[in-house]
Image (tube, rainbow, N blue to C red):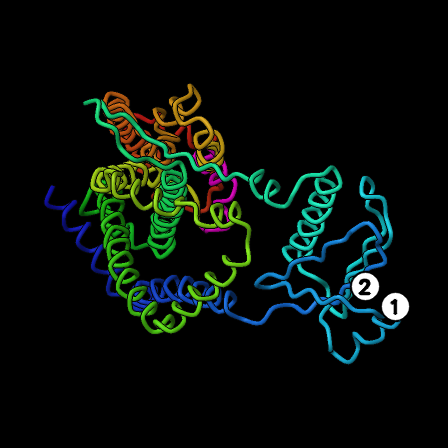
Amino acid sequence: MNKILLIIQREYLSRVKKKSFIVMTLLTPIIIAGFYGVAIYFSIQGISGTSNKIAVVSENKTLLEKLPSSKNRNYQYVDQSLKEMKSSLKNGSYDYVLYLPDFDLNHPEGIQLLGNKQAGLTLSSKISDDIEELIRNQKLKTSGIAQEELDKLKTSVDIDTKKISDTGKEEDSSAGASTIIAYVSGILMFMFIMLYGVQVMRGVIEEKTNRIIEVMISSVKPFQLMMGKIIGIALVGLTQFVLWIVLTASISTVAMKMLVNDKDLKESAMQASVQAKKMPSAQVAAANTPGIGNIQKSLANLELTKIISVFIFFFIGGYLFYSALYAAIGSAVDSETETQQFMFPVMMPLLFGYILSLSVITNDPYGPMAFWLSIIPFTSPIAMMVRLPYGVPDWQLMLSMGLMVIGFVGTVWVASRIYRVGILMYGKKASFKEMIKWFAYKN
C-alpha cells in the first residue's frame, strides 16, 4: 500500500507542477468566463442597437395595413418602383428592400427581399413571420372581425409545472432547468473521462518507450504501478475540476460587472418597455411569461448537493473504469500511433451512452432505455448524470453505484492481467488475439 501511495504522490506532483497544467488551469476559466461575458454583452448591445432599415415597395392592393416596425426591423414604405430602389441600395440609404407584389391572400407569391449583403436566417425568418401575421390579420378583418376581437384571439398559456415529492409536498419544477443541468453534466462527464483516461494511456506509453518502466518494475508490482498511476491522475483531474469551478465563478462575476454596467441594463429595460407599449395586450403577456422565473425556482429546488456528490462519484468511478482499459492499451503498444485500433472499441460504449443519453433520456427519462443505460457500468456515468436532475429512485441510484464499483473492480482485474505482460513487451505489434493470450498467462 505504501508503494501505491508513493506512486500516487509522484504522478500527482509531477503533473500539477507542470507549466502546461498551471497554464490550462488558469486559462480555461478565463476563456469560459470571457466567452459567456462577451455573449451576454453583445446580446444586450444588440437589444439597444440600431435596427435594419428596410424599404418596403408594395404593389399589393389587398393588404391595407402596414408592416409594424420592431426592435431590429424598421419598415419604411416608399412610393418608388422596385427598379429605382435597387439602384438606391448602392448609396446605403437602406439595408434591404422588401418587395410585396399584388398577390392573392390565399396564395402569396413573388415576395422578394433584396440587399447588397445576404440577409441572415433570423432576419429573413422574422420578416416572413411579420408578413404572415399581416396577411392573417387582413383575412380576419375581411371576415368582419374587429381589431379588439383579434387581440383577444391571441392567448398566451404558461404552465406552472409541479412535482409531488415522496412526502406528498408540491415542489416547483421545470423541464428546462432539468435539461440544462442534464446536458451540462453529461458533456462534462464525457469530456473529463476521455481527457484524463487518455492521459493515463499516454503516461504508460511514455514510460514504456523511455524504458523507465524497467527500473520501476524492479521495485513495485505491475498492478501497484497501474493503480498508482490511475489514482494519481484522477486526483489531478479532480484538482483541476474544482479549480475550474471556483475560478470560473469568480472571473464570471468580475467580468459581468466590468462588461455590463447599470446603464446598459436600464437602457435594455427601457427599450423592452417601449416595445411592449407598441404590442397588443396578448403579445405583451406572451413576452412577459414567467418561464425564467420558473427555471430559477426549480433550480433552487434541485438537490444540487446530491447532484454534485453523485457527479464526483461517477466521475471517479467512470474514470477508474475506463482508465484501466486505457492503461492496458498503453502497455500493449510502443507508440501512440498504434493505439487507434484499440481506442475505438473502448471509446464506443462511452460515446454510445453519451449520444443516447442526450436524446432518449431527455425525452423519456423514466423509460426502460433510460433505466438500462443508467445501470450498465459502460454507460452509467453519463446516463445517470443526465437522469438525476429529473429525479431517480434511490434504489436505482444505489444499484447503479454498486454495479459501477463492481464494474471498476472487474475492469481493473482484466486490465492488470494484460498490463503485467504488455508493459515489458517491446518491438512486437500487439493485437486483440495477442492481448487475450496475455490475459490467460498464469504468471
* Figure check: 81 above or below 400: below
Work out how far the residue at label 2 is from the one at label 1, CA to CA, in angstroms.
7 Å
Check contact, mark 2 vs mark 1: CB within 8 A: yes
Crowding around mark 1 (Cα neighbors within 10 Å: few <14, some 14 to 19, many 20+) is few
Mark 2, Cα crowd under 10 Å, few <14 / some 14-19 / many 20+, is many
Residue drawn at the location 26% of the way across and 26% of the way down: 397
Q: Quarter of the image containing the N terminus?
A: top left
**Of 376 and 252, the residue lying toward us:** 252
From the viewer's perspective, tell me whether residue 10 is left or right of residue 388.
Answer: left
Range drawn in magenta: 335-350
Q: Position of residue 35 (x, y in %)?
A: 43, 64
* Circle on res. 57: 2
**Mark 1 = which residue?**
81
**Residue furthest to the top:** 368
Magenta: main secondary structure: helix
Magenta region includes residue 8 = no
Q: Position of residue 410 (x, y in %)?
A: 29, 27
Asked if residue 343 lies in the magenta stretch, the reply is yes
Q: Residue 422: in sight, yes or no?
A: no
Q: Is residue 109 visible?
A: yes
Residue type, label 1: Ser
Within the image, what quadrant is residue 440 found in? top left
* Precedes in sequence: disc 2 or disc 1: 2
